[in-house]
Image: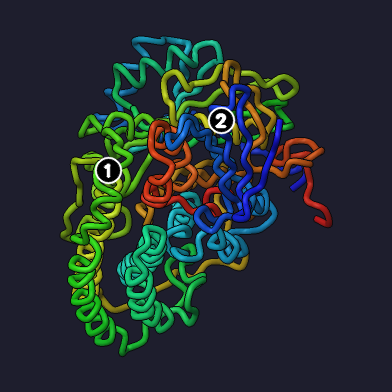
């Protein structure tokens, strides 16, 4: 059988009767990240898709077994540096449950502020990439630029732009500076004004609508059974948000809506995170209003540990439900940590949505699923 | 951590938890549904607020999952994790299932665990019930060497192609230099 490699690096492999072509998209292809999709096409139609992750697997779960709770913090946010507070949040909650650690009230509000800021930082990053892969370069520039507003805030609070290592079991690492509140309100007001403009240039753009409406439709029942989560699940009409159904920290005291859409297509999956950003701004402002003063961290001993037991904690990160299963054997090092990350759960939806779709719709479907190879591989 | 390290003793700990904490009413309802249907086949490990865990046998796994999905309403696969307990010669595979449809169960996570012998860990795949577990099971297969019977594609997923060692999440696999 003849194998040829196109100048773009894509390998082409025809079937026996020459009708089905096997294309290997990735891992060097710029449209996929560190991830490969082996698709079989009949003409322009995808007949089979086989996801092949693992190019950036770093064994996070094994590494956790060699480090204690505090040592585990910096490396656990590496799989998702764009949403580093989101991926650390359930780990910290699980440690607190195992060790029965009380968290000061102020720290709970600060955590929510930082988690929401980080979720927006992530969503803007994703929106930028989604924009450029659908050929909309303005939508690449704008979110990337506006993301700096939020990164500035995160830097002000934590001292680092992306990997903050800010959440610790028992609270947060340090208090917010005094000027944070005023600056946050100013930046968020301006950011909200910018969000309004996104709608005009991107979400009502006929080119974007053509490429995403009725493309890759995921029904509610399939979405639940395939185990997808977050905006992808809510875009299919399932009202499922961990912040609402199982409020952690002080989410039960905050007033916000869960955004859902009924269509379940790529457009809905792109629009739900956009509308959620308004809610996130709203949540941060409420937290800044309600936040009490006081300590932000419960002092733990030098080598914190808990009794024998297990904890399963989940939060709503930027991409959806992020859960940690932590088994403790009574020593400072966790016996087993399992990260159930939203990106990994999206893999199951890929073959389901891509089968029968046109090859040209692949980027629109793939990116709408909010899949991040580094997070999925861990 | 080497295999000589301490291991969590799940049975004694869970008995204690059941005795100490009274089961909240909604969780009690779920536990009752399961125990009426399965009796001694499903052993309650704990029922804390919003978290329930049962231990079952591999041969009941499909029937149990089907009952959980169709009759009880836990329909969303969240995670499949394997844990190695070399001292008891057991690999434990634990499924965490959430619920999207029944309003009062939505805040809960239902877990059921299968204890498999370490030298021949085999359990039927649950893809016929929860399609979403396909890639989770593949990961557990390569990380702990658990064979999921009738899995359509039980192949390597995350590890490098030239990986020629024991499954890395087993406790007798040690990172070099540690």
Q: Please tell me which residue lies in front, A110 or A347.
A: A347
* Image quarter in which the N terminus of chain A is found: top right
Task: Kindly report the distance in space between the C-alpha atoms of the residues bearing marks 1 and 2.
Answer: 28 Å
Q: Which residue in the protein does label 2 denote?
A: B137
- Name the residue: 54% across, 29% down: A20
- Name the residue: 18% across, 41% down: A262
Do labels 1 and 2 touch, CB within 8 Å? no
Indicate the position of residue B94 as horizontal and vertical percent values.
52, 30
Indicate the position of residue A333 as horizontal and vertical percent values.
64, 53
Horizontal side, residue A191 vs residue A360: left or right: left
In this view, A3 is above or below B150: below
Q: Which residue in the protein does label 1 denote?
A: A265
- Name the residue: 38% across, 40% down: A228
Quarter assignment of residue A3:
top right
- Name the residue: 38% across, 45% down: A361
Indicate the position of residue A222 as horizontal and vertical percent values.
33, 30
Q: Please tell me which residue lies in front, B46 or A80.
A: A80
Q: How many numbered marks have been drawn onto this rendered protein structure?
A: 2
């Amino acid at each position: 059988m003849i194998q040829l490699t196109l100048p773009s690096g894509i390998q082409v492999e025809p079937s026996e009767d020459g009708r089905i072509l096997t294309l290997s998209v990735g891992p060097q292809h710029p449209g996929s990240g560190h991830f490969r999709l082996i698709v079989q096409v009949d003409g322009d139609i995808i007949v089979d898709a086989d996801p092949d992750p693992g190019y950036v697997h770093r064994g996070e779960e094994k590494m956790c077994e060699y480090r204690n709770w505090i040592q585990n913090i910096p490396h656990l946010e590496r799989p998702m540096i764009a949403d580093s507070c989101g991926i650390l949040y359930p780990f910290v909650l699980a440690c607190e449950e195992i060790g029965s650690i009380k968290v000061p009230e102020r720290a709970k509000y600060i955590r929510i502020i930082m988690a929401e800021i980080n979720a927006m930082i992530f969503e803007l990053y994703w929106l930028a990439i989604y924009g450029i892969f659908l050929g909309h370069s303005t939508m690449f520039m704008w979110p990337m630029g506006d993301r700096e507003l939020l990164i500035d805030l995160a830097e002000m609070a934590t001292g680092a732009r992306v990997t903050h290592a800010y959440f610790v079991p028992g609270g947060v690492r340090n208090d917010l500076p005094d000027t944070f509140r005023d600056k946050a309100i100013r930046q968020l007001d301006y950011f909200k004004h910018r969000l309004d403009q996104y709608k005009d240039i991107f979400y009502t753009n006929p080119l974007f609508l053509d490429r995403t409406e009725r493309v890759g439709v995921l029904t509610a029942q399939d979405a639940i059974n395939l185990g997808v989560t977050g905006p992808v699940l809510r875009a299919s009409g399932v009202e499922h948000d961990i912040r609402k159904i199982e409020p952690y920290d002080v989410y039960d005291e905050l007033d916000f809506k869960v955004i859902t859409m009924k269509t379940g297509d790529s457009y809905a999956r792109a629009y739900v995170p956009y509308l959620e950003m308004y809610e996130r701004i709203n949540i941060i402002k409420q937290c800044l209003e309600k936040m009490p003063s006081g300590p932000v961290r419960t002092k733990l001993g030098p080598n914190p540990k808990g009794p024998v037991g297990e904890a399963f904690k989940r939060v709503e990160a930027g991409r959806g439900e992020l859960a940690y299963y932590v088994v403790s054997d009574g020593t400072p090092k966790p016996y087993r940590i399992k990260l159930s990350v939203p990106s990994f759960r999206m893999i199951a939806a890929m073959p389901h949505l891509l089968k029968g779709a046109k090859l040209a719709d692949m980027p629109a479907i793939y990116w709408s699923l909010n899949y991040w190879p580094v997070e999925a591989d861990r | 951590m080497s295999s000589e390290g301490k291991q969590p003793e799940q049975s004694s700990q869970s008995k204690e938890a059941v005795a100490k904490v009274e089961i909240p009413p909604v969780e009690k309802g779920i536990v009752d549904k399961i125990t009426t249907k399965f009796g001694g086949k499903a052993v309650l490990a704990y029922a804390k607020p919003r978290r329930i865990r049962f231990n079952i046998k591999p041969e009941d796994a499909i029937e149990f999952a089907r009952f959980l999905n169709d009759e009880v309403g836990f329909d969303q696969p969240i995670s499949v994790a394997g844990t190695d307990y070399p001292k008891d010669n057991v690999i434990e595979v634990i499924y965490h299932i959430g619920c999207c449809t029944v309003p009062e169960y939505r805040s809960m996570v239902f877990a059921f665990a299968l204890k498999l012998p370490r030298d021949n860990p085999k359990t039927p795949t649950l893809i016929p019930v929860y399609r979403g577990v396909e890639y989770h099971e593949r990961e557990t297969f390569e990380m702990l060497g658990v064979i999921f019977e009738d899995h359509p594609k039980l192949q390597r997923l995350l590890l490098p192609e030239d990986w020629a060692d024991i499954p890395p999440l087993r406790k007798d696999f040690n990172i070099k230099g540690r």
